[in-house]
């Protein structure tokens, strides 16, 4: 017998829909601050989201009043405020993948002498969630919390290669901007590269996302079997010789498998 899941619910009213739309606008405004410059102004946000300046201004003032956004004297624009920082820190503390990855990535840094990173999949982009910096004087560091496209760099490509075909193709049908002269910008070439990444389980980048940077990454699968992010070893490109890359391939692949196992244990009853 079919069960009517809507039984007993009140039908949506115009005020309900308006409230949902308003909440979506606020969320869209906040998400802009994760992928752009530190400061954003009313005009930029209005243009990016196709909203009137009056609407954007009201949203910004509401967020400032709650310290989710803030302004600085002498600077035009808004930035993330202390409440947003607190929310982000709280989310990271509760993210099981980060808990599972921390000891593994620290050890991987000691084994390689290079910076190790954790990236998370956010929509059809990725963000760096954590890094463990190389102890060397010349090293690579990453910007935590900033969104990056999936088609450029090893951390993004290895996620893209692991996505279901429909999601992967949706990304490939969009514009693929060149971040450096080595970025793959055509869907056909990228498909070939991703097929090789999927077979190998590891992606390598030599200056694809950032000039002079080398990296080797492996996908991070969750206990549900879906890809949720990636881990990488990264550093100056000149140190990523064929011999080093060959060694890092095995290390990063083994580290990702260890993190996945620890992540699954954390989600079991009594695992924490």
Image: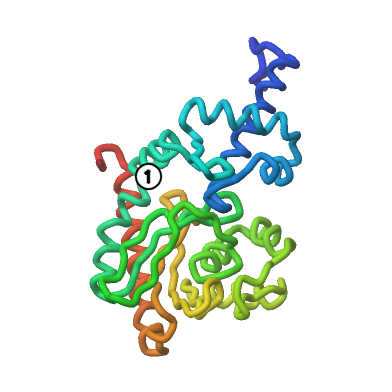
Colouring scheme applied when the structure was drawn? rainbow
Residue 50 x %, y %: 76, 41
Helix, strand or loop under label 1 = helix
In the rendered image, the vertical position of residue 36 relative to residue 11, given as above or below: below
Residue beneath the point at 58% across and 42% down: 77
Closer to us: 135 or 231:
135
Between 253 and 122, which is closer to the camera in this rendering? Answer: 122
> With respect to residue 99, does 235 lie above or below?
below
Q: x%, y% of residue 108?
A: 28, 69
Q: Is residue 23 left or right of residue 92?
A: right
Above or below, comparing residue 2 to residue 105 in the picture: above
Mark 1 = which residue?
Answer: 92
Q: Is residue 228 visible?
A: no
Picture coordinates of residue 100, whole percent (x, y): 31, 53
Front in this rendered view, residue 164 or 96: 96
Task: Quarter of the image for the C terminus: give it.
Answer: top left
Instruction: Check the image and name the residue furthest to the front.
Output: 74
Quarter of the N terminus within the rendering: top right
């Amino acid at each position: 017998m079919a069960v009517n899941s809507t039984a007993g619910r009140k039908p949506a009213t115009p005020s309900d829909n308006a409230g949902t739309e308003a909440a979506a606008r606020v969320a869209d405004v906040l998400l802009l601050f994760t992928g752009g410059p530190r400061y954003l102004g009313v005009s930029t946000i209005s243009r990016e989201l196709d909203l009137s300046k009056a609407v954007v201004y009201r949203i910004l003032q509401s967020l400032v009043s709650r310290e989710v956004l803030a302004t600085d004297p002498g600077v035009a624009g808004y930035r993330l405020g202390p409440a947003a920082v607190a929310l982000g820190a709280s989310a990271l503390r509760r993210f099981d993948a980060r808990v599972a990855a921390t000891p593994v990535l620290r050890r991987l840094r000691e084994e390689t002498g290079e910076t190790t990173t954790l990236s998370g999949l956010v929509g059809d982009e990725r963000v760096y969630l954590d890094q463990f910096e190389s102890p060397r004087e010349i090293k690579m560091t990453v910007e935590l919390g900033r969104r990056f496209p999936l088609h450029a760099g090893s951390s993004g490509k290895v996620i893209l290669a692991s996505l279901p075909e429909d999601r992967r193709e949706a990304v490939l049908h969009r514009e693929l901007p060149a971040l450096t002269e080595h970025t793959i910008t055509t869907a056909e070439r990228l498909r070939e590269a991703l097929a090789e990444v999927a077979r190998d389980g590891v992606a390598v980048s030599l200056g694809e996302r950032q000039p002079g940077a080398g990296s080797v990454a492996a996908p991070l699968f969750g206990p549900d079997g879906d890809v949720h992010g990636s881990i990488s070893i990264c550093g100056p490109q000149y140190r990523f010789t064929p011999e080093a890359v060959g060694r890092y391939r095995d290390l990063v692949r083994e580290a990702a498998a260890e993190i996945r196992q620890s992540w699954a244990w954390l989600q079991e009853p009594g695992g924490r």
